[in-house]
Amino acid sequence: MAAPKIVVLAGSIRTGSLNEKLAAVVARALEDAGAETTHISLKDYPLPLYDGDLQAREGVPDAAKALVDLFLAQHGAFVASPEYNASFPPLLKNAFDWMSRVSVEGKPPLPAFKTKVFALGSVTNGAMGGYRGLTQLRAMMELGLGALVLPEMVSVGNAADAFTDDGRLSNPRTADFMASVVARLVTEAGRLA
Ligand SMILES: Cc1cc2nc3c(=O)[nH]c(=O)nc-3n(C[C@H](O)[C@H](O)[C@H](O)COP(=O)(O)O)c2cc1C
């Protein structure tokens, strides 16, 4: 089996983002599990707030096209998303909304999402670890974008104690669960490689 290509991103560009830390942990675990991993930051793909008039006037921004091109070259993706008011943040919604407006000739709609398998995770300071936000993100990705999303989601609560100084997950059960999600993502993405 060829090594699957998997992109990892966080739904936060905040300095010191907890979800960026989770993305880094997962990216390393994916590499260790044999995936060819690309860890990106949405900071490098700045996008205006979606506006149909702007799209009609200027087309889809280059950053959204670049994200679609990048996603098309992958077999899998891991998204680490903060929880904002029991949902997921506008940074992710906006990026995925713009990406959903990119049409690729000769391909079915939403090729960046329909052609790969996704896994989701979240870190919050609260006890529920962003699980409520992940259910909202899952609904958008499955129902709106046609994505295949693994049922298991990495939910990390009590963030103050969640990471070791060298950037690993400190709770062994959480670390084992994350590793199992990573293993499944590599297996499922590997079927597409
Ligand atoms: C607008 C807003 C809403 C938030 N709502 C929630 C929430 O519903 N549940 C929760 O656990 N944390 C909530 N938080 C706290 C975030 O989980 C926390 O700021 C987290 O560090 C954000 O992720 P990041 O560190 O990756 O940027 C909220 C934060 C913001 C800014």
Image: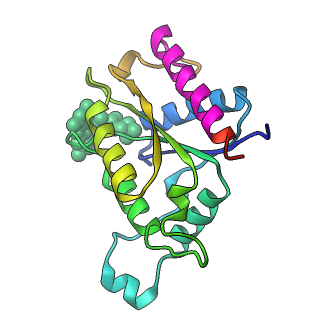
Position of 190 relative to 50 (above/below): above
Q: Residue furthest right?
A: 2
Quadrant in which ligand 1 is drawn: top left
The answer to whether any part of residue 167 appears in the image is no
Magenta span includes 182: yes
Give the farthest residue toward the left.
Answer: 85
Which residue is painted at 79% across and 41% down in the image?
2
The image shows residue 20 at horizontal and vertical percentages of 49, 38
Q: In the image, is residue 45 part of the stretch drawn in magenta?
A: no
Where residue 79 appears, as percent x and y from the top left, is 48, 42
Q: Residue at x 42, y 30 (%)?
A: 153
Q: Say whether residue 63 is left or right of residue 145.
A: right
**Residue 105 visible here:** yes
In what quadrant of the picture does the N terminus appear? Answer: top right
Q: Quadrant of residue 123?
A: top left
Q: Residue at x 57, y 75 (%)?
A: 104
Magenta range is: 168-188
Quick one: 81 or 192, which is closer to the camera?
Answer: 192
Residue 155 percent location from the top left of the image: 38, 26
Q: Name the foreground residue: 132 vs 85.
A: 132
Main SS of the magenta segment?
A: helix
Q: Position of residue 130 (x, y in %)?
A: 31, 32
Q: Residue furthest bottom?
A: 57
Quadrant position of residue 87: top left
Q: Note whether 182 is above or below 74 in the view shown.
A: above
- What number of labels is visible? 0
